[in-house]
Image (tube, rainbow, N blue to C red):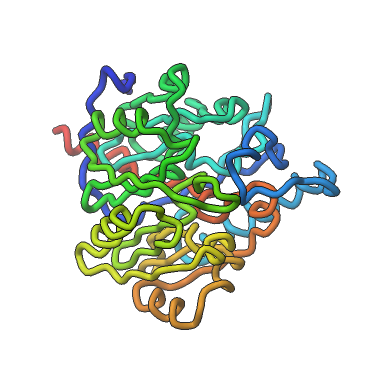
Amino acid sequence: MQAGTGAGLQADLPTEPMAAPALMLVRPRRFAGNPQTQSTNRFQQTAAGSPPRRLMSGARREVERLARALGCAGIEVLVAADRAAYPSPDAVFPNNWFSTHSDGTVILYPMLARNRRRERRRELLDWISRARGFALNRVLDLSGLECQGEYLEGTGSLVLDRRHRRAFAALSPRTTRGALAQFRAVTGYEVTVFRTCGPGGQPVYHTNVLLAIGSGWAIFCPQLIMDPRERDLVRAQLAEGGRSLVEIAPGQVQAFAGNCLEAAGGDGPVLLLSDTGWRSLAISQRRALEREADLLPVAVPLIERHGGGSVRCMLAEVHLPRAPDIAESRT
């Protein structure tokens, strides 16, 4: 496995399908409202009145519920264990610390909250590779940007249009210009940056709560994008390739309707979202999305309420090739 820093390794990421061949969840050992993320995430509610043990058991049940739903839909799911020592209250959101790519590249990302940085686990990457049969070719480590006060929280900060090698990013304390410039430099991705005004007049903490992209569809909330020029640019780029655009309102963003992900199901594409988000959609919006994929809502209300993230945040995409695929490509 080749490892390197952002300054020393050029990834030049490939064009890829939107839906990953597998998805990963983390079964938490600890779950609670994280005080270190509260100030930047207005979707996160306090855990007052809920005993920590009850929160942990409830979060584990919601993770298992999502895993069962994925399996029943014919989606390959990997359920990883949280680290035994020093578990993180936000381990259920693995997409914030790494992303994977079809040439065998893994990118590690810089995160704002100090108690979330211990979620980065090389042994978990080894487990994906050795135990589950995926090829890990190189690790591109951007986490050193934390020392410079630059942050980029994985596919929370970045919504990737893998087919067109473009990333969409809403600026926030967790998504900074310096980190985005480094991502652009080492991956070759074009990056569309925009400013938002979300709950409480603050920037929306992660791009993936207001924007999602599938093979034939895209969801976004134009009302939260401050600059009309940026809004129009995002709309035009999302429409490339004839995608069906579904615009959602700020209240639907608050209900996590935008926090969704396309997966490769046994019978075709599946759009994964929470029951809360699904219920907030109008009939016309559901029908537009159902023309592109089967909708699979799953109830994760406790994780939404206390963690401030929903179904998409809980899923790390495994775009890595199977181990024999890389071996054959090198012969």
Task: State left or right for residue 148 relative to residue 165.
Answer: right
- Residue 7 location in percent, x, y? 28, 19
Q: How many marks?
A: 0
Task: State left or right for residue 27 relative to residue 124.
Answer: right
Residue at 23% x, 46% y: name it: 165
Task: State left or right for residue 17 relative to residue 93.
Answer: left
**Nearer to the camera, 272 or 81:** 272
**Residue 78 makes an appearance in the image:** no
Task: State left or right for residue 61 relative to residue 223.
Answer: right
Dividing the picture into quadrants, the one containing residue 90 is top right
Residue at 31% x, 27% y: name it: 138
- Residue 331 in the image: above or below residue 50: above
Residue at 38% x, 61% y: name it: 264
Dividing the picture into quadrants, the one containing residue 279 is bottom right
**Nearer to the camera, 190 or 133:** 190
Dividing the picture into quadrants, the one containing residue 129 is top left
In the image, farthest residue toward the left:
331
- Residue 317 in the image: above or below residue 212: above
- Residue 84 location in percent, x, y? 67, 28
- Residue 10 location in percent, x, y? 22, 26
**Residue 18 makes an appearance in the image:** yes
**Nearer to the camera, 15 or 74:** 15
- Residue 57 location in percent, x, y? 76, 48
Residue at 26% x, 17% y: name it: 8
Quadrant placement of the N terminus:
top left
Quadrant placement of the C terminus:
top left
